[in-house]
Image: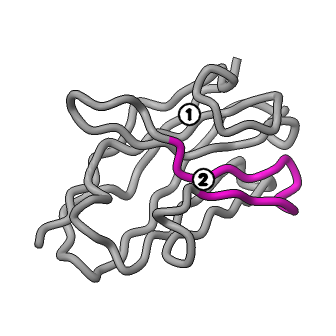
Amino acid sequence: QVQLVESGGGLVQAGGSLRLSCAASGRTFSSYAMGWFRQVPGEEREFVAVISRSGGSTDYVDSVKGRFTISRDNAKNTVYLQMNSLKPDDTGVYYCASSKLWSSRPADFGSWGQGTQVTVSS
C-alpha cells in the first residue's frame, strides 16, 4: 500500500509557475504509473497528467498541454508536476495517485495523497 504526500501548492498570479512534488513510500514505486488530478468544490475530480512506470510515456488533459510537464525520479520515489503559464481555471486541489494500470480514470488509481491547494489569481 503506497503512501503519497503532495507539496508545492500555493497562491500564484496568472502567468506564473509552480512545481508540485509527490513523495511516495515503498520499494515498489517504479511498478506504478503515477497521475495528477485536480478538483474544485462541486466538480468531479479531473485527470491532469499521467506518467508511465519508467517515465517513458506521458499523457495530459488537453487544457494543460504545452504548459504542464509531469516527470518522475524513481530513485527518489517522487513524481513532479511542473506548471507554467498558470491560468485561474487551473485553481483547485491537486492530488497525486498511483495505479498498476496505464490509465487516466480516477477509479483505476488505488492510492491517493492528501492534496495540495493551488490558487491562481487573475
> Residue 4 magenta-drawn?
no
| Image quadrant occupied by the C terminus | bottom left
Mark 2 and mark 1 lie on one chain; the one further toward the N terminus is: 1
Q: Residue at x 22, y 27 (%)?
A: 42
Q: Where is residue 2 drawn, in percent x and y?
A: 68, 25
Q: Secondary structure at mark 2?
A: strand
Q: Residue at x 61, y 23 (%)?
A: 111
- Which residue does the numbered mark 2 point to in the structure image? 49
Tally of numbered discs: 2
In the foreground, 40 or 34: 40
Q: Nearer the viewer, mark 2 or mark 1?
A: 2
Q: Residue at x 21, y 70 (%)?
A: 12
- Dot 1 crowding, Cα within 10 Å, few <14, some 14–19, many 20+: many
The segment highlighted magenta reads: 47-60
The answer to which quarter of the image holds residue 75 is bottom right
| Image quadrant occupied by the N terminus | top right
**Is 114 drawn above or below residue 74 in the view shown?**
above
Judge from the rendering whether residue 59 lies leftward or rightward of residue 15; answer left or right. right
**Is 97 drawn above or below residue 57 in the view shown?**
above
Color encoding of the figure: one colour
Q: Residue at x 38, y 37 (%)?
A: 115
- Which residue does the numbered mark 1 point to in the structure image? 4
- Dot 2 crowding, Cα within 10 Å, few <14, some 14–19, many 20+: many
The amino acid marked with disc number 1 is Leu
Q: Secondary structure at mark 1?
A: strand
Q: Where is residue 121 drawn, in percent x and y?
A: 13, 68
Judge from the rendering whether residue 29 lies leftward or rightward of residue 96; answer left or right. right
Numbered tag placed on residue 42 in the rendering: none
The answer to which quarter of the image holds residue 65 is bottom right
In the foreground, 89 or 117: 89
The amino acid marked with disc number 2 is Ala
